[in-house]
Image: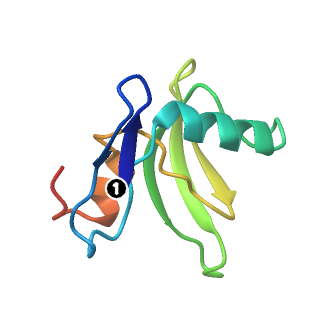
Amino acid sequence: NQATDSHNRITMPIARDEKFNFRAVYWNDLHGLLYNALPSETVLWGHQFLAFQPAHDKNSVKIQARIVESGNTVEIVGDLLVAADGSMSIIRHLLLPDCKL
């Protein structure tokens, strides 16, 4: 809930509402932690997210993505979809359409 400016030794709140049900994180830190912890074949570079839905077994997620280089659309099935696509997140907007920045 807090950010720290180590240069000025100031700590300030980033979320004042205790009912705020998600947190923000510096994208580069999150990306590095996830990328370094996962097997190399897990992260798909050069793919543009299009849509997602729970798989029929409800234990996984189906993701539709466009391969940027070829323009082909592929379906990917995974255990987890991480929405680390920034402050204008398409995935967050799909999950929480009424949530404002």
> Is disc 1 surrounded by few (<14), some (14 to 19) or many (20+) residues within 10 Å?
some
> Which residue of the protein is positioned furthest toward the front in this rendering?
9
Residue 57 x/y as whole percent: 66, 82
Residue 55 on image: x %, y %? 59, 72
Identify the residue position indicated by label 1 in the image. 92
Q: Which image quadrant for residue 34?
A: top right
Estimate the x, y position of residue 43 in percent, counting from the top left. 69, 38
- The residue furthest right is 39
Q: Amino acid at mark 1?
A: Arg
Which of these two is toward me, 82 or 60?
82
Q: Is residue 28 left or right of residue 45?
A: left
Q: Residue at x 52, y 23 (%)?
A: 68
Is residue 73 something that shows in the picture?
no
**Residue at 50% from the left image edge and 25% from the top image edge:** 71
Horizontal side, residue 12 vs residue 45: left or right: left
Tell me, what colour scheme is on the image?
A: rainbow
> What residue is at 57 percent from the left and 41 percent from the top?
30
Figure disc tally: 1
SS at mark 1 in the image: helix
Q: Where residue 88 sits in the image (x, y, percent)?
A: 28, 40
- Is any atom of residue 25 visible in this view? yes
Q: Dividing the image into 4 quarters, which one contains the N terminus?
A: bottom left
